[in-house]
Amino acid sequence: MEMTIQKKITKGIYLVIDPSMDRLLLLDKLRLALQQP
């Protein structure tokens, strides 16, 4: 369980730091989340 949490945290930080494709994917996820009712 700890590994999964750490993986998620690491992935989140990576998405925030990465300047290109992963940031676009993150923004796309946020946009989809905002579209949800």
Image (cartoon, grey):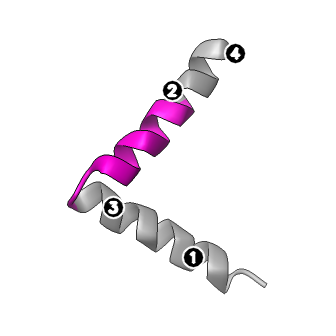
Q: Which residue is mark 1?
A: 32
Q: Earlier in the sequence, mark 1 or mark 2?
A: 2
Place residue 13 in its image quadrant.
Answer: top left
Magenta segment boundaries in residue numbering: 8-20
Residue at 54 percent across and 34 percent down: it is 9
How far apart in space, not on screen, are marks 3 and 1 (Cα)?
14 Å
Whole-percent x, y for residue 19 in the image:
22, 58
Q: Quadrant of the C terminus?
A: bottom right
Give the residue type that dot 3 points to. Answer: Arg
Which of pointers 1 and 4 lies earlier in the amino acid sequence?
Answer: 4
Classify residue 18 as left or right of residue 1.
left
Q: Is residue 27 magenta?
A: no
- Name the residue carrying label 4: 1
- Magenta stretch encompasses residue 11: yes
Q: Circle 1 sits in a helix, a strand or a loop, which is it?
A: helix
Q: Choose the circle earlier in sequence order: 3 or 1.
A: 3
Q: Which residue lies under the disc numbered 3?
A: 23
Question: Which residue has dot 2 on it?
Answer: 7
Q: Three-letter amino acid code at disc 2?
A: Lys
